[in-house]
Image (cartoon, helix red, strand yellow):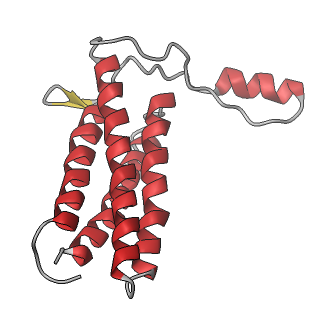
Amino acid sequence: MTNLPLARALALIFPLAMLAGAYAFQYVGGMHPCEMCWWQRYAHMAAIPLALVAYAMRGKACVSALFTGLAGLAIGIGGGIGLFHAGVEYGWWEGLTACSTSPAGGNPADILNQIMATPITRCDVAPWSLLGISMAGYNGLLSGAAALLILALLIGKGSKA
């Protein structure tokens, strides 16, 4: 028997909390995400509907476990991207050279004004760190741990499905 209810809850709550934190840093803290930050967010965004399907399929334990595992995989992918991003920030390897700017369409004068007003965010500079670990590093560590915990709950011996 697995501990599917706990794994399923973690697969939903964790990416919601990580995205809430990311958006708080962006909109409250004024730290605009770079391209690799968005990649990490996309992985967490993918985990949420997968976890919701797992909840919707509670009556079919195998299907629910499959979607919970897929949500855990998406969380783990977000963590892997976070670790890669942290390595770029620390200068351990080279990452993207492009900056994050994405103005919406419209008339050319508006587009130019939007481009000029869009903050340029480099992927190789950590805008924030705590104890020497950047946001990307924390995402990598926490998401990796959450993904492993979800996997362990799915395959381990525990309560009931």
Q: Compared to 140, does 61 lie above or below?
A: below
Q: Compared to 93, does 156 lie above or below?
A: below
Q: Compared to 137, does 160 lie above or below?
A: below
Residue 34 seen anywhere in this rendered image of the structure: no
Residue 150 seen anywhere in this rendered image of the structure: yes
* Left or right, 39 with reference to 68: right
Q: Residue at x 23, y 60 (%)?
A: 150
The N terminus appears in which quarter of the rendering?
Answer: bottom left
* Left or right, 110 with reference to 127: right
The C terminus appears in which quarter of the rendering?
Answer: bottom left
Q: Residue at x 40, y 50 (%)?
A: 74
Q: Give residue 84's quadrant in the image.
A: top left
* Left or right, 53 with reference to 89: right
Q: Residue at x 13, y 66 (%)?
A: 156
Location of residue 141 in the rendering, given as x and y in whole percent from the top left corner: 21, 40
Viewer-side residue, 143 vs 89: 143
Viewer-side residue, 152 vs 113: 152
